Image (spheres, grey):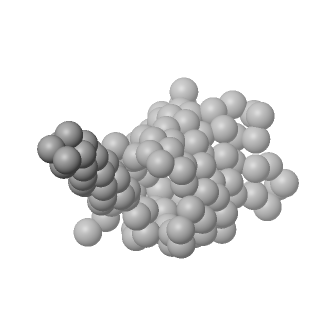
Amino acid sequence: MMFSSRILAVATASLIAVSTSVAAAQRLAVDLTGKWTFEVVTENGTGVSAVTIAQKGDSLTGTYTSGRMGTLPFTGMVKGQTFTFAANTSGGATFTFSGTIIDADHITGDLDFGGQGGATFRGARTP
């Protein structure tokens, strides 16, 4: 009986540790919903854009607004600490943003201009 009690105690402690780790990982998940300022760095310089994101589960929707492109709606997804979203321009090009969540208020990534070049971006949540 003593052997069974020890096994049960070890199994219970292991289950608690795993449950605690899963709960901590879930708390670390960041909801990207909100307003963001993106600094987009191209070979021609840096531009600032306003981005509004709505996240429901793993799905993203929102708008990307820049002086050059106007306001473009987008859709995308988030998985763990990475995300991607795409916006179609009036000229038929698709801008694709692929990034990493740094923390609750900062993201970074790459922007593909529909096969016509690219850029990097840094995003900061706007209060």
Residue 59, image quadrant = bottom right
Q: Position of residue 16 (x, y in %)?
A: 24, 54
Q: Position of residue 97 (x, y in %)?
A: 59, 46
Residue 4, image quadrant = top left
In the shown orientation, is residue 73 left or right of residue 122? right
The number of numbered discs placed on residues in the rendered structure image is 0
Q: Quadrant of the C terminus?
A: bottom left
In the shown orientation, is residue 97 left or right of residue 38? right
| Whether residue 42 is situated above or below residue 19 in the rendered picture | above
Q: Position of residue 47 (x, y in %)?
A: 47, 46
Q: Position of residue 63 (x, y in %)?
A: 58, 68
> Which residue reaches farthest right?
92
Residue at image location 66% in from the left, 38% down from the top: 112
Residue at image location 69% in from the left, 40% down from the top: 113
Of 127 and 26, nearer the camera is: 26
Evaluate whether residue 17 shows in this view.
Answer: no
Of 74 and 30, nearer the camera is: 30
In the shown orientation, is residue 57 left or right of residue 10? right
Residue at image location 60% in from the left, 57% down from the top: 77
Evaluate whether residue 59 shows in this view.
Answer: yes
> Which residue reaches farthest top?
43
In the shown orientation, is residue 39 left or right of residue 62? left
Residue at image location 43% in from the left, 69% down from the top: 33
